[in-house]
Amino acid sequence: MPHSKQLGKERLVFFSDAILAIIVTILVLDIKVPIVETGGDAELTRRLIVQAPHLVAFVLSFAVIIVLWYSHNRLMGMVDTPTNTFGVINFLFIGVTATIPFTTALVGEYPGSSVAAAMLAANMLLMNIFITLCFVYAMKKNLVGKNFVFGHYDKMKRIMGIIGTFLFLGSIFVAFLSPVVSLVMIAAVPIMHCLPIKRE
């Protein structure tokens, strides 16, 4: 039987979306409900404040994953016939994304740690690199559908992707100077992608 170089697009999309949904679900499991036996609302408030870094880390990682999901959705919309190589790069993206719950929990548990912030930033950088490689490979190997037209929106998203890559890369080094500033740099990426882009 001849070896096929193409993958079923629907199965690839379904599998990727399912894994990303599971990753997001695992993310929220790091946020625990405080158990207060004595002290009433005052103790509950104190414990919620202690839990705050976990919530902030969750929101940060969730926002980045959603941005990348939109990019991935756009990618799969433009690709007609994904190949085995494209599938491998896609699974590398999914695999790196699967470690986000760990690095997110690390930052939540050690919010002032330079190492924890740098690891989260590196995780984000790798996610961005692999999703970018998916786009580059799809375009180089002519996997893009003939009816797909690259417009102003796609150009701006590509520029934002490049800026995001440098922000993630820079935040790794900045983490060893100020973990807080590093996390702010990471947060700037999803905020940037929320800016309205005029479609032409």
Image: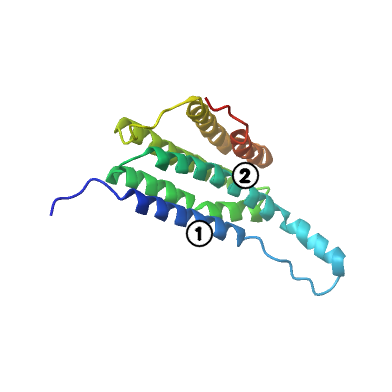
Image position of 108 (left or right of 122): right
Instruction: Identify the residue at image location x=58%, y=57%.
Output: 27
- Residue 50 sits in quarter: bottom right
- Residue 160 sits in quarter: top right
Compare residues 11 and 136 and report the one nearer the observer: 11
Badge 2 amino acid:
Ser
Instruction: Identify the residue at image location x=26%, y=46%.
Output: 6
Tell me the SS state at disc 2. Answer: helix
Q: Is residue 34 above or below residue 77?
A: below
Mark positioned earlier in the residue sequence (2 or 1): 1
Residue 39 in sight: yes
Circles 2 and 1, Cβ within 8 Å, touching? The answer is: no
Q: Which residue is mark 2?
A: 114
Colour option used? rainbow
Q: Is residue 147 above or below residue 39?
A: above
Q: Which residue is mark 1?
A: 22
Q: Is residue 179 above or below residue 199?
A: below
Image position of 29 (left or right of 151): right
Estimate how packed mark 2 is, as few (under 14), some (14 to 19) or many (20 or more) residues with alpha carbons within 10 Å: many
x and y percentages locating residue 79 in the rendered image: 36, 39
Q: Nearer the viewer, mark 2 or mark 1?
A: 1
Instruction: Identify the residue at image location x=81%, y=60%.
Output: 46
